[in-house]
Image (cartoon, helix red, strand yellow):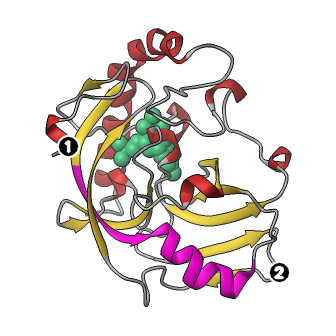
Amino acid sequence: MPNESPLPPGQYEAKTFYRFGLTPFATRFPHDPTSRSLQISGDVERQVTLVDVLEDLPAVEQLSDFHCVTTWSYRALRWEGVRFADLFQRVIQPQARPAAGAQWVILQAQDGYRTCLPLEDLLAPDVLLATRLDGAAITIEHGAPLRLVVPSHYGYKNVKHLRRLDFCENRQVYRPLGFRFMDHPRARVALEERAVGAPGWFFRYLYRPLVRSTAARFRRTLAEYLTSADRG
Ligand SMILES: Nc1nc2c(c(=O)[nH]1)N[C@H]1C(S)=C(S)[C@@H](COP(=O)(O)O)O[C@H]1N2
Ligand SMILES: [Mo]
């Protein structure tokens, strides 16, 4: 059971699953919160737009803990969706035919957020494209309509509002958001790959003081968005 396992190094258990991220994204929201479409592009033989990512793939349900790089973790989230590996092998490979050397995937979101992971990490069996969380459709707060779930990697690789995958042979074409040091190429939680340029524990002390104010800002901006004139 996830609740009995110790947390990864430097993490503490949060009692709230915050809406969270880099502060510029607090006020950005998906323009299409219901579509399950996903674009496949970059170093591929054919660019494709998948209309429904879940179509014809086995449905999976998974319990996993979530670890934000700023040191809070939230236990036992129940995600439903499809495995990235199934999507890659059964749909992306035959339809888009990524270059054999395309070992990186740039993950692009509807709110302008992006990050990058090695294809190899995305092919792990616990990596999902999720549309449901804890028995209900994922809310805008947590990544509607489609969210990447990579439980062994820090929260910042778990892209909300996912809309496009760019396969790429050369990682240099990828431009990180914010400060370059903040986006570790892999960001594996067990190895405390929080960021680049200093040991993982160093960033605990840099990031932890930001949790309360960041969570408060994301909560406030979501409330404003949900109560703005054109929404119910
Ligand atoms: N599209 C998008 N995905 C994102 C972010 C974001 O701002 N926009 N923030 C990342 C960070 S830093 C974290 S910790 C998690 C937070 O997910 P949550 O808001 O569901 O807790 O989303 C990640 N994925
Ligand atoms: Mo995060």
Q: Is residue 219 above or below residue 203?
A: below
Q: Residue at the location (45% across, 9% down)?
A: 205
Q: Secondary structure at mark 1?
A: helix
Q: Which mark is residue 232?
A: none
At a point 80% along the width and 69% down the height, the residue shown is 100
| 150 in relation to 81, above or below | above
Asked which secondary structure carries label 2, the reply is loop
The type of residue carrying mark 1 is Pro
Q: Note whether ligand 1 is within 8 Å of mark 1.
A: no
Is the C-beta separation of discs 2 and 1 under 8 Å?
A: no
Where residue 54 sits in the image (x, y, percent)?
42, 81
Q: Report whether 173 appears left or right of 79.
A: right
Residue 62 highlighted magenta (yes or no) = no
Q: Report the residue marked by disc 2.
A: 45
Quadrant where the C terminus is found in the figure? bottom left
> Which residue in the protein does label 1 denote?
2
- Residue type at numbered disc 2: Glu
**Which residue sits at x=29%, y=44%?**
223
Please name the predominant secondary structure of the magenta segment in the image: helix
Which quarter of the picture shows residue 96?
bottom right
Q: Give the mark count.
A: 2
Give the farthest residue toward the bottom. Answer: 56
On the image, which quarter does residue 2 sit in? top left
Q: Nearer the viewer, mark 2 or mark 1?
A: 1
Answer yes or no: is residue 28 visible: no
Q: Of callouts 2 and 1, which one flags the residue occurring earlier in the amino acid sequence?
A: 1
Image coordinates of residue 137 in percent, x first then y, are 26, 68
Q: Quadrant of ligand 1?
A: top left
Quadrant position of residue 70: top left
**For the magenta stretch, what is the residue range?**
77-97
- Determine if the magenta segment contains residue 81: yes
> Could you say where residue 12 lies in the image, as x and y percent from the top left?
27, 22
